[in-house]
Image (cartoon, rainbow, N blue to C red):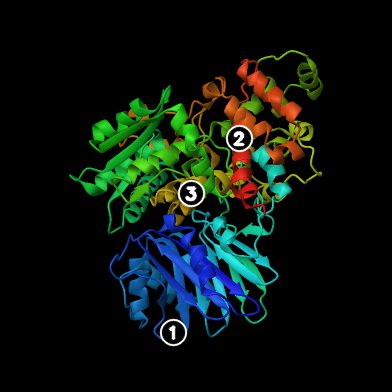
C-alpha cells in the first residue's frame, strides 16, 4: 500500500523539490520508504507501506527496456496467477511484487489489462515511447485519485493536500460541492470542495499526453445488475459461500500481520470467521470500538468468543472524540459528515499497534441489499391502493402523525426523494439555509435511467453503489485507516464477489422483511444464529446525546465561521441548535455536518489565506 503523486510541467523547468514536498505531505500513507522519478517535465513520487515483497518491492519499478515506469498504490490479489500467465509468454521478473506484475500486464495487454486485475489499486505508468502518463483507479473506488490542471501544470495525487505544496495552487472553496454536501453529507460531485480539483471516478483512467498536455478520461469497466431468475437457490447459496471463502483467502495474502475489524454484525462476522478458518490454530486478531454510552462490544463477543479470536475492544469518550475531529478532517481532505468515521479512526489507531493490514465488511450492504431502506418499496406496495387524494389529505394534517415521512415518500416517485442512504437537509431546507449563489443539485437521472427496468429496491442499490459507497463508505474506510498507516482490505468488493452479486434476483436479496436474505442463508451453518439474523450494526456513535450537552465551544465554531456566515443563514442554524439542545428535535446529524464544514474551512482555506 502506498500513496502516489505526480506533476507535469507543461513548459518544462520542473523543480525536484516540488514533487518531494507533494509526496512528503502524504507520508502517513507509506512511512516505510519513498521513491521518485524526475526529469525536466515530469515529477513522479510515492510513499510506500511495505506489505508484499518487503525487501525487493521498492518503487519505481521499470520494464527491462526502460520504456515503462510505474508507481503503484494498492494490492493485486491474483498477481501470482497473472504472473504465471506472463511467464508463459516469455516475461521475466526482477521482483516478487505485485507492482511489477501490473507493469508487465500493461506492457502485454495495454489498457485491457486494467479489467483483468483483481484487487484495489491506484497507479500511474509513464510510457516513454508513447509520451504519455496513464493514471488508473480501481473498480469501486477503494483507493482515491485526485487531479488538477492549471495554466502551468497538471498534477495528481492520492490526497488533495499534496497540491498545497504546489506554489501556484491557491485553495478556493467550490460552492457547488458545499451546496450538495448539505443534502448528501459528503460531496457527490466529480469536482471536489477545492475549485479545479477533481476526483478520478472508479473504474476510470486518465491519459495525459506529454506532447499536447491534453487529458483524456475513459471508463474501462462498469458494474451493472444482471439478475438471473433461473438461478437455483441451493446452488447459489453454495456459490456465495465458496466465493466469499476464496475472496477472504486472497485478501489475506501479505508478508505482514493481518487482522480484522469486528462490529458484531453479519458482514464483519463473516470476514472474521472465514479468516479464522484459513488460519486454523493461529488466532486472528480482531478489533472493535465502543463509546461511553454506546457499545457493540457484547455483539462482537458473540462472534469472537466461539471463534476464539485474539480480540481487542476500545472505548472512546466524548472529549477524546471531539479533540481528534480536526485531525481526522485534515486526513479526509473533504468533509464527510458521517459520525461513524471517527469510530474507524480510533479503531485503526488501536489495530495498528498489532497488525499492518485489516479486513473489513464494507460493500456487502450495497451488493447484497443490506440496508433496511431497501425494504421500503415492498412496504409501499401495501398502501398502493390508497388514492393519491387521500394521501395528500393525510399529509395536510398539521400535526406530526406517526409515519408521516413514510407517507410522504410513498406519495412520491423514488427518483424524487431517494439520493442515497444519507439525506441530511431536504430540498426545502437547503433553500431555507443556503444564501450563497444558487447552485445546482446533483441530478441522479442517469443512474435511474440505467436501471429503469428494475425494481425500486435495485434502483436504490445502484444509486448507492455509484454515490454513497464511494463518497462515504470507502472514503472514510481509506482515509481513517491510512491516517494511521494501516491498510484496509474489503473482500466483499472483490471483483469475483461483485460478478456473483450482480446476478442475484430480488427474491434472493429481500424476503419477508429480511435483508441480504441469501447471504444470510449461505452462512446458516457457519455463523451463530444470533449473529446471522442480526440487523446492521456498524460502529454507531452517541453524538445525539453529546450535542444536547453544553457545547458552546462547538456551536460557536459553526456560527462564527466566516464561510458559514457568508453562505448560510445563521439564524436558521441557531434554531437548529436550540431545537436540538432543548430536545424538540433530533438535529444531531445536521449539527455534525455543519461542524465538519466549519473545521474543514478553517483547516484548508482560512489557514492558507495570504
> Few, some or many C-alpha atoms within 10 Å of disc 3 (few <14, some 14-19, many ≥20)?
many
Label 1 secondary element: loop
Kindly report which numbered mark, 2 or 1, lies closer to the viewer in this rendering. 2
Question: Whole-Å distance between the Cαs marked 2 and 3?
Answer: 19 Å
Kindly report which numbered mark, 2 or 3, lies closer to the viewer in this rendering. 2
Report whether residue 185 is seen: no
> Few, some or many C-alpha atoms within 10 Å of disc 1 (few <14, some 14-19, many ≥20)?
few
Q: Earlier in the sequence, mark 3 or mark 1?
A: 1
Question: Which of 453/472 is in front?
Answer: 472
Q: Residue furthest front?
A: 610
Residue at numbered disc 2: 595
Question: Whole-Å distance between the Cαs marked 3 and 1?
Answer: 34 Å
Residue at numbered disc 3: 479
Q: Position of residue 177 (x, y in %)?
A: 69, 47
Question: Whole-Å distance between the Cαs marked 2 and 1?
Answer: 50 Å
Q: Relative to 69, is 400 above or below?
A: above
Label 2 secondary element: helix
Q: Earlier in the sequence, mark 2 or mark 1?
A: 1
Residue at numbered disc 1: 66
Question: Which of 436/465 is in front?
Answer: 436
Question: Which of 309/415 is in front?
Answer: 309
User: Looking at the image, which residue is at 76% across and 39% down?
Assistant: 566
Q: Position of residue 543 (x, y in %)?
A: 52, 27
Left-right relation of 195 to 358:
right
Amino acid at each position: 500500500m502506498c500513496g502516489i503523486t505526480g506533476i507535469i510541467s507543461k513548459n518544462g523547468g520542473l523543480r525536484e523539490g516540488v514533487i518531494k514536498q507533494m509526496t512528503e505531505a502524504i507520508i502517513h500513507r507509506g512511512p516505510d520508504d519513498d521513491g521518485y522519478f524526475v526529469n525536466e517535465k515530469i515529477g513522479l513520487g510515492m510513499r510506500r507501506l511495505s506489505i508484499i515483497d518487503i525487501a525487493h518491492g521498492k518503487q519505481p519499478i521499470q520494464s527491462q527496456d526502460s520504456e515503462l515506469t510505474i508507481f503503484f498504490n494498492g494490492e493485486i490479489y491474483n498477481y501470482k496467477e497473472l504472473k504465471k500467465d506472463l511467464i508463459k509468454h516469455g516475461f521475466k521478473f526482477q521482483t516478487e511484487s505485485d507492482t511489477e506484475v501490473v507493469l508487465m500486464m500493461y506492457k502485454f495487454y495495454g489498457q485491457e489489462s486494467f479489467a483483468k486485475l483483481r484487487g484495489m489499486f491506484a497507479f500511474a505508468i509513464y510510457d516513454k515511447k508513447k509520451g504519455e502518463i496513464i493514471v488508473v483507479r480501481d473498480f469501486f473506488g477503494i483507493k482515491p485519485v485526485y487531479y488538477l490542471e492549471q495554466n502551468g501544470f497538471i498534477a495528481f495525487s492520492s490526497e488533495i493536500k499534496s497540491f498545497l505544496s504546489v506554489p501556484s495552487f491557491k485553495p478556493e472553496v467550490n460552492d457547488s460541492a458545499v451546496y450538495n454536501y448539505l443534502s448528501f453529507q459528503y460531496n457527490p460531485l466529480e469536482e471536489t470542495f477545492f475549485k479545479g480539483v477533481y476526483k478520478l471516478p472508479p473504474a476510470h483512467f486518465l491519459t495525459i499526453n506529454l506532447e499536447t498536455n491534453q487529458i483524456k478520461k475513459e471508463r474501462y469497466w462498469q458494474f451493472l445488475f444482471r439478475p438471473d431468475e433461473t438461478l437455483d437457490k441451493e446452488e447459489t447459496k453454495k456459490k456465495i459461500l465458496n466465493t466469499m471463502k476464496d475472496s477472504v483467502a486472497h485478501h489475506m495474502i501479505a508478508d505482514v500481520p493481518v487482522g480484522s475489524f469486528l462490529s458484531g454484525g453479519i458482514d464483519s462476522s463473516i470476514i472474521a470467521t472465514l479468516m479464522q478458518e484459513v488460519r486454523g490454530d493461529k488466532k486472528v486478531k480482531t478489533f472493535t470500538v465502543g463509546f461511553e454510552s454506546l457499545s457493540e462490544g457484547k455483539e462482537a463477543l458473540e462472534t469472537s468468543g466461539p471463534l476464539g479470536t485474539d480480540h481487542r475492544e476500545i472505548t472512546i469518550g466524548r472529549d477524546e472524540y471531539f479533540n481528534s475531529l480536526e485531525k481526522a478532517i485534515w486526513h479526509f481532505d473533504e468533509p464527510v459528515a458521517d459520525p461513524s468515521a471517527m469510530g474507524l479512526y480510533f479503531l485503526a489507531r488501536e489495530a495498528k499497534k498489532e497488525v499492518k493490514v485489516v479486513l473489513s465488511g464494507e460493500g456487502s450492504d450495497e451488493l447484497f441489499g443490506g440496508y433496511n431502506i431497501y425494504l421500503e418499496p415492498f412496504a409501499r406496495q401495501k398502501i398502493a391502493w390508497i388514492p393519491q387524494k387521500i394521501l395528500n389529505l393525510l399529509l395536510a394534517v398539521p400535526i406530526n402523525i406517526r409515519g408521516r415521512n413514510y407517507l410522504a415518500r410513498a406519495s412520491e416517485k423514488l427518483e424524487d426523494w431517494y439520493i442515497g442512504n444519507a439525506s441530511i437537509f431536504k430540498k426545502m431546507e437547503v433553500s431555507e439555509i443556503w444564501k450563497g449563489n444558487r447552485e445546482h443539485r446533483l441530478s441522479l437521472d442517469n443512474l435511474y435511467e440505467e436501471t429503469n427496468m428494475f425494481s425500486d429496491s435495485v434502483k436504490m442499490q445502484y444509486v448507492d453503489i455509484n454515490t454513497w459507497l464511494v463518497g462515504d463508505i470507502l472514503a472514510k474506510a481509506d482515509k481513517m485507516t491510512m491516517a494511521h498507516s494501516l491498510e484496509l482490505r474489503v473482500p466483499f468488493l472483490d471483483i469475483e464477489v461483485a460478478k456473483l452479486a450482480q446476478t442475484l434476483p430480488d427474491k434472493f436479496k429481500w424476503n419477508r422483511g429480511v435483508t441480504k436474505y441469501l447471504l444470510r442463508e449461505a452462512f446458516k451453518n457457519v455463523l451463530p444464529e444470533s449473529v446471522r439474523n442480526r440487523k446492521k450494526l456498524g460502529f454507531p456513535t452517541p453524538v445525539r446525546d453529546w450535542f444536547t450537552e453544553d457545547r458552546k465551544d462547538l456551536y460557536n465554531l459553526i456560527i462564527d465561521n466566516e464561510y458559514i456566515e457568508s453562505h448560510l443563514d445563521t439564524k436558521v442554524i441557531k434554531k437548529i441548535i436550540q431545537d436540538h439542545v432543548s430536545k424538540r428535535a433530533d438535529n444531531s446529524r445536521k449539527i455534525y455536518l455543519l461542524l465538519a464544514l466549519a473545521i474543514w474551512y478553517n483547516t484548508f482555506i482560512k489557514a492558507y489565506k495570504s
